[in-house]
Amino acid sequence: MIIAPVWIFDLDNTLHDATPHIFPHINRSMTAYLQEHLSLSEDEANALRTDYWQRYGATLSGLMKHHGTDPDHFLRNTHRFPELSKMVLREPRLRSVLKQLPGRKLVFSNAPLQYAQAVLKLLLVDDLFDDIFAIEHSRYRPKPQSAGFRSLLRKHRLHAAQCVMVEDSAENLLTAKRLGMRTIWVSDALRAPSYVDVKIRDVLELPRAAGKL
């Protein structure tokens, strides 16, 4: 008997395109937060935000490590979206694609829970997921750190070999593969690293890609 996999999805730039509106808004909000709370110029704050994101996988991790920043305060102030419905780009075929995939579906995001819930609702797919494992649930240890992955597996009593990780971040997929998950990379890159099992350009290609795992 073939057992259906457990699908673990990243959110931003995997289930929807966050590049045009969402990410610029978050980047501006984070830069403004660093300016205010660390007394930095805009250029200094922007450089530090980028440095921490590149070094730790999330700006928040650097702020907690080096400045003792309260994570809930940071997330509340940097993930305010008064016009989120106008910023989320919904692909009408997404729901149909997800329903074609056999097995349970989870979201694993470095974003806060409230934001992830709101985005999935706007995408009209929130009811298709069994759980959202957000940054709070990993005790603020973001992907690509393995701690969050392990916490998710423990919470849902899963073995990594049961899971398929669908992500736009190659670094996050490297962690997933090292733990024993199968990996699908959502990317328009020409070549995929060896730890990627299947590369697709768009999440809408998933039903076809599932047959290659």
Image (tube, rainbow, N blue to C red):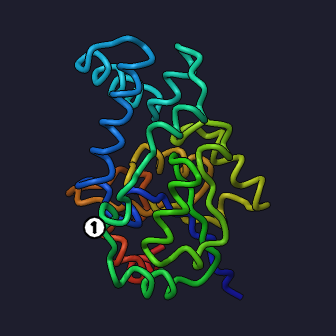
On the image, the x and y values in percent for residue 195 come to 44, 52
Residue at the image position 40 percent from the left and 52 percent from the top: 81
In the figure, 101 relative to 159: above or below? below
SS under mark 1: loop
Number of residue marks: 1
Which residue occupies the extreme top position in the image?
39
| Residue hosting label 1 | 201
Residue at the image position 52 percent from the left and 38 percent from the top: 75
Residue at the image position 36 percent from the left and 36 percent from the top: 29
On the image, the x and y values in percent for residue 143 come to 53, 42
Which residue occupies the extreme front position in the image?
82
Q: Foreground residue, 67 or 193?
A: 67
Residue at the image position 39 percent from the left and 79 percent from the top: 94
Q: Quadrant of residue 148?
A: top right
Q: Residues within 10 Å of mark 1 (few under 14, many from 20)?
A: some
Q: Foreground residue, 19 or 170?
A: 19
On the image, the x and y values in percent for residue 56 come to 47, 28
Q: Is residue 182 visible?
A: no
Q: Is residue 77 visible?
A: yes
In the figure, 152 relative to 148: above or below? below
Q: Amino acid at mark 1?
A: Arg
In the image, is 157 to the left or to the right of 140?
right
Quadrant housing the N terminus: bottom right
On the image, the x and y values in percent for residue 33 come to 41, 27
